Image (tube, rainbow, N blue to C red):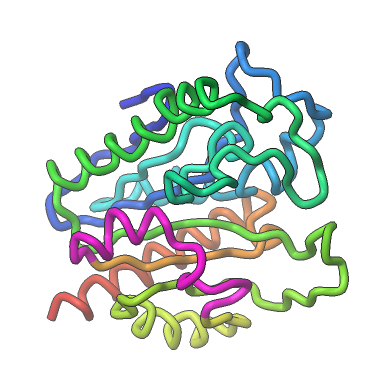
Amino acid sequence: MSDEAFRLVGSPRFGGILVVADHASNRVPEDIDLGIDPALLSQHIAVDIGVREVAERLAERPGFAAFLCNVSRLVCDCNRDEGAPAIIPIASDGHAIPGNELDHEGHEARLDRFFRPYHAGLADQLDAMPVSLILSLHSFTPQLASDPAQQRPWQVGVLYNEDDRAARVALPLLEAEGLVVGDQQPYSGKLLNATMNRHAEAEGRPYLGIEIRQDEIGDSAGQAEWAERLGRICNQVAIAIGE
């Protein structure tokens, strides 16, 4: 199933696992001019590198499906609260986005076109097909251009807000893989967790927030490795929190 704001990949199952990726696409509709160098659309400010491919691989596994945003986060960042200024960013990691300097009417039109349908579609999917676990999947850049001194050694981070049921199970499982794992790194889910706050925590649905460092999933081999790893771990997490 596909919409301008989202894509549903795979066959959702009752009690299965739904991968949710707010930043899976770098698509900019032809009628929107962001006023930026097109080369930026392949960088982390426009898309979570590698996430779409990992999510699509996961959706091929029995019991998994994926709900993917179908527009770049530079057009509309769906992992924000509706009133947040950065929902339609005018700058990102030191790059100005002049095409996003919208008046109120233009701002509301952008939300009506992408943000609200995305969240309505996700809510409808979760209501229609209850799952045992939501995997909130993101990736992070090894280095921010705006803060080059910041160290980001973690290969993967686990993020959460108030509901840490899945996180507490997943952290030792990821560490057992020999990975450098960040607990609430490279930033805290208590500060940036909008989609999961809305669709998981507010509804009592268990979720696992995962941030993979982009160089881990920048090619097909890494994407396959992480899809296999997350498939195993998510099944273990779902079983553990369901007992």
**Residue at (42%, 83%) from the top-left corner?**
173
**Residue at (53%, 28%) from the top-left corner?**
107
Is 162 colored magenta in this rendering? no
Q: Report x, y in % for residue 21.
A: 45, 48
Q: Nearer the viewer, residue 44 or 57?
A: 44
- Which residue extends farthest front? 104
Judged left or right of residue 216, residue 105 is left
Q: Is residue 189 above or below residue 52?
A: below
Q: Nearer the viewer, residue 211 or 55?
A: 211
Q: Is residue 200 above or below residue 98?
A: below
Is 196 colored magenta in this rendering? yes
Q: Report x, y in % for residue 23.
A: 53, 45
Q: Look at the image and tell me in which quarter the C terminus lies.
A: bottom left
Q: Is residue 102 above or below residue 65?
A: above
Q: Report x, y in % for residue 181.
A: 57, 81
Judged left or right of residue 216, residue 225 is left
Residue 163 visible at all:
yes
Q: How many marks?
A: 0
Q: Look at the image and tell me in which quarter the N terminus lies.
A: top left
Name the image quarter holding residue 206: bottom left
**Residue at (30%, 59%) from the top-left corner?**
134
Q: Report x, y in % for residue 76.
A: 54, 35
Q: Nearer the viewer, residue 51 or 144?
A: 144
Name the image quarter holding residue 4: top left
Residue segment shown in magenta:
184-205
Residue 57 visible at all:
no
**Residue at (63%, 43%) from the top-left corner?**
47
Name the image quarter holding residue 146: bottom right
